[in-house]
Amino acid sequence: MSSGNGSGDVEALRAEIRQTRAELGETVQALAARVDVKARMRESADRTKQRIQDQAAHTADVVRESVRGTGEKARRNAVPWALIAVAATAATVLVVLMRGRRR
């Protein structure tokens, strides 16, 4: 700034004015961004959408791993599953035959 006696450096004063204008422009832009409710809501919706997509992808990965693990367990323990299948089939055949004899 000038010293008040009129002998200030004109170029320094111009530089200070340019700096003040730049700061004022940044302040106006920041205030405009805070007042733009539509843009803020859009940004919030985009963040929420991304968070939900990330959570869905993570959940899908967990389910895939769980299913893959279950399939591997079934293959390792094939005999018990086969016995259960045979028993279920035999029970079904028995029920059908018993109903047939009642008619």
Image (cartoon, rainbow, N blue to C red):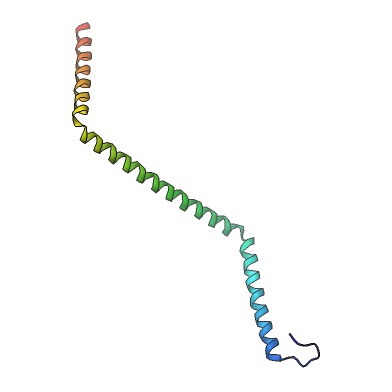
At a point 21% along the width and 32% down the height, the residue shown is 77
* Image quarter hosting the N terminus: bottom right
Looking at the image, residue 64 sits to the left or right of residue 75; the answer is right
Tell me where residue 71 appears, x and y as whole percent: 25, 37
Residue displayed at 46% across by 53% down:
50
Residue at (81%, 90%) from the top-left corner? 5
Rendering quarter of residue 6? bottom right
- In this view, the residue farthest toward the top is 102
Q: Residue at x 22, y 28 (%)?
A: 81
* Image quadrant in which you'd find residue 98: top left
In the rendered image, which quarter contains the C terminus?
A: top left
Q: Return the x and y of residue 95 as percentages of the image width and height.
A: 23, 14
Examine the rendered structure and indicate whether residue 44 appears above or below residue 15: above
- Residue 36 appears anywhere in the view: yes
Q: Residue 50 or 69: which is nearer the viewer?
A: 69
**Is 21 located above or below residue 58 in the figure?**
below
Q: Nearer the viewer, residue 58 or 53?
A: 58
**Residue 103 visible in image:** no
Residue 72: x and y in percent read 24, 38
